[in-house]
Amino acid sequence: MALEIWDPAGCCKTKFVLEVGLAETYAMLQEDTRMWLEGREDVSAVMLVKLQEDPDYCCPTRNLSDQDLAQQKFLGYSAIKRHDFMLESAYGPAVYNEGTWVGSITGFIEIWKREPVSGYAICTGDRIVSLHLR
């Protein structure tokens, strides 16, 4: 996501970028952040948000036979309600029908800017850690 503004000359400029990743590695997010800051003069700041799922997602029905899957007695999509899922803690994992569907979600936030002398992208300030999502 990017915040764009119109300058006095009527040109659209990207000033702020929000770079969020769950499947992307931290290294990939850093590469994207550097691309924005070092490749675009108009970008002033990038907020990098790295989300992590623990354990990594693995479909709990992937290895079930058709017979085993039928015995699970899953409700139809429209019949499943929020209360059918149980959270093992305030931040997950989410369990439905004895299978873990979503792991515990945590993450962190960093603010990146362009270093004035070198022009290279740098992380500024402290990382905001232990971000828990519900």
Image: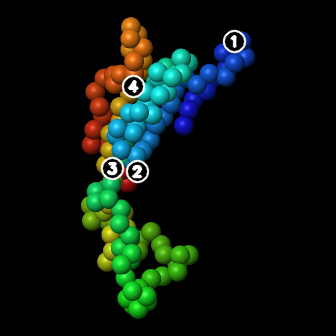
Disc number placed over residue 8 in the picture, else none: 1
Disc number placed over residue 23 in the picture, else none: 2
Amino acid type of disc 1? Answer: Pro
Q: Residues within 10 Å of mark 2 (few under 14, many from 20)?
A: few
Which label's residue is closer to the chain start, 4 or 3? 3
Q: Tell which tag, 2 or 3, sits nearer the viewer.
A: 2
Which label's residue is closer to the chain start, 4 or 1? 1
The residue shown at (47%, 28%) is 35
What percent of the width, then of the height, locates residue 26? 34, 40
Q: Residues within 10 Å of mark 3 (few under 14, many from 20)?
A: many
The residue shown at (35%, 66%) is 58
Q: CA distance from mark 4 to mark 2?
A: 20 Å
Place residue 123 in its image quadrant. top left
Amino acid type of disc 2? Answer: Ala
Q: CA distance from mark 4 to mark 3?
A: 20 Å
Q: Tell which tag, 3 or 1, sits nearer the viewer.
A: 3
> Can the viewer see residue 58?
yes
Work out which quarter of the rendered image holds the N terminus and state it. top right
Is 89 situated left or right of 29 in this image? left
Disc number placed over residue 52 in the picture, else none: 3
Q: Tell which tag, 4 or 2, sits nearer the viewer.
A: 2
Q: Secondary structure at mark 2?
A: loop
Amino acid type of disc 3? Answer: Gln
Q: Residues within 10 Å of mark 4 (few under 14, many from 20)?
A: many
- Residue 115 lies, with reference to residue 74, above or below; the image says above
> Which residue is the site of mark 4?
112
